[in-house]
Amino acid sequence: MKKIKAVPVTKENFAPYGRYFNFFDIPARVSEDFTAYTSVSELADEPMNLGITVCRGANQFTSVSMERHMLTEEPQFCGDGAMVLTVADSDPEKYPEAEDVKAFLMKPGDVVVLAKGIWHDANHGTEEGKDVLYYFMATNKEPDNLREIEWVKISPEPVLVEVRGEEK
């Protein structure tokens, strides 16, 4: 089984998979009661619904299957704790290939916008036994969303992702 190490996400290393930015790098609106950060451009290429996922935390996990979206981009927002996003730039008409799988560490404030056709697993928290939240935007148009959420096994076998460790 292939084993990879999750690396901190940056604008440069995420470029093959989509766009990256951090909300905390954007000038904030500050008042006595709050500090607010707002994206400076549209995040996706069409109107979308907002979703939330609670993901389990672990020092390592096995990425078994992935989905990809052929019709839309997918913005993902790191929520209340560090997490790992696992992606593959394999042929979107076939399946995610183990040799293409990469893993990115995200921290609160980080946002990625997955390009159309990029395979991705559900995210995982980075702390053993600690659940974390992340938010995503997705289309909800019938019948488009039926093909958009198909989960496909990684070929030829799953990939072991280490939150901290050596890539092999």
Image: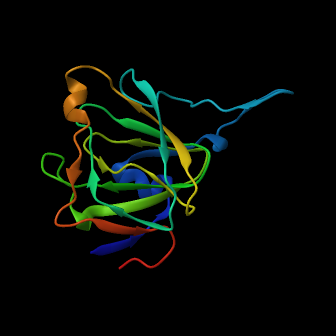
Give the position of the C terminus as an image quadrant. Answer: bottom left
Task: Residue 28 in the image: state x and y as whole percent.
Answer: 72, 33
Give the position of the N terminus as an image quadrant. Answer: bottom left
Asked if 105 appears above or below 67 in the picture, the reply is: below
Q: Quadrant of residue 99?
A: bottom left
Q: Residue at x 23, y 20 (%)?
A: 142
Q: Nearer the viewer, residue 133 or 47?
A: 133
Q: Residue at x 39, y 23 (%)?
A: 48
Asked if 72 appears above or below 64 in the picture, the reply is: above
Q: Nearer the viewer, residue 36 or 83?
A: 83
Q: Is 115 left, or right, of 77 in this rendering?
A: left
Q: Residue at x 58, y 52 (%)?
A: 107
Asked if 122 appears above or below 47 in the picture, the reply is: below
Q: Quadrant of residue 126?
A: bottom right
Q: Nearer the viewer, residue 27 or 148?
A: 148
Task: Residue 154 in the image: state x and y as whole percent.
Answer: 22, 59
Q: Is 24 left, or right, of 112 in this rendering?
A: right
